[in-house]
Image (cartoon, rainbow, N blue to C red):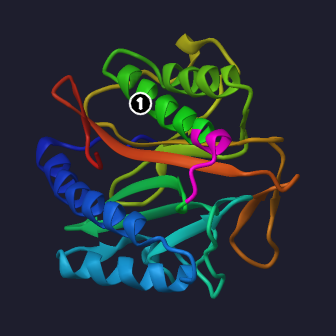
Amino acid sequence: MIVYKNIDEIEQMERAGKILSKVLASALKKLKPGLTTSYIDQEIEKEIILLGGEPGFKKVKGYHWASCICINEQVVHTPPSNRIIKKSDVVTIDTGVFLNGFHTDSAWTIQVEVKNPEITRFLETGQRALKEALNVAKKGNYIGNISKTFQDVIEGAHYSIVRELTGHGVGKDLHEDPYIPCYIDRPIEKTLEIQDGMTLALEVMYSMGGREIIYERPGWSIEIADGSISASFEHTIAIKQGKTLVLTK
């Protein structure tokens, strides 16, 4: 069931999104060789609280951290740990801010210090996929337009979409309907129409190699089965009075 938000609720999410944008940008700048992902997570939580928000991810049952921090083959949901960040690692920070009853969610991937041309191209492709998806995520279009855009850009560059993982609605709960696949498997017109009041977390998840994933058991981390490099780019958006607002820009 889609939970539509009114103008006041979207404005609350805009405030949360501004906090999240600052926190994520700050955290990405702190990624240095020799630091642990646990240290970065602690810094994220401190800044969220300092700016007046709450760590949204800690409201997920059983999850005890303010962020997910994935390295190389880890694609999503990896808890912070004592793993040490190394030079040339590809690191994704995924985090969320809860403010006045509403969540926002955002993720970004960078390479630490080194600028390997192949990795640069890989990451620029994901950024372009998200940018183009934001351009079609507008009232009157369909969720399928977003999914097809992700697939066209990523597979057009000869990378692999992780098909089991999706974007999602976001609001009073971190994960709400609808699911937003990163690929299209039906006619676009048979997917959900985008309407005013929708608040969505658009996220593209992909790898340099295969698309098959493995789940850490017990645990949270989801990884690329063949060990190849992965990445994720995500923004929270709202459809407000016919316009698309990027809340975590």
Q: Nearer the viewer, residue 53 or 194?
A: 53
Rendered residue at 81%/41% (across/down) = 209
Q: Residue at x 16, y 57 (%)?
A: 15
Judging depth in this view, the residue of 171 and 246 nearest the camera is 246
- Quarter of the image that includes the C terminus: top left
Does residue 50 appear left or right of residue 77 in this picture?
Answer: left
The image shows residue 115, relative to residue 88, as above or below, that is above
Q: Picture coordinates of residue 113 (x, y %)?
A: 52, 61
Residue 248 seen: yes
Residue 208 percent location from the top left of the image: 74, 41
Number of marks in the rendered image? 1
- Residue 95: quarter of image: bottom left
Q: Is residue 62 visible?
A: no
Residue range of the region highlighted in magenta in the rendering? 114-120
* Residue on which the image places disc 1: 131
Which residue is situated farthest in the right direction here?
Answer: 226
Q: Is residue 249 left or right of residue 38?
A: left
User: Tag 1: Cα neighbours inside 10 Å, few (<14), some, or many (≥20)?
Assistant: some
Magenta stretch: residue 116 in it? yes
Task: Give how far across and how far down residue 220 sits, in percent.
Answer: 68, 71
* Residue at horizontal 63 percent and vertical 47 percent from the top: 116
- Regarding mark 1 in the picture, which secondary structure is present there? helix
Residue 17 placement: quadrant:
bottom left
In the image, is 85 to the left or to the right of 31?
A: right
Q: Is residue 64 above or below residue 137?
A: below
Q: Amino acid at mark 1?
A: Lys
The one nearer the camera, 198 or 132, is 132
Asked whether residue 170 is drawn in magenta, I would say no
Nearer to the camera, 176 or 131? 131
Residue 72 in the image, given as x and y percentages of width and height: 69, 60
Residue at 64% from the left image edge and 70% from the top image edge: 78
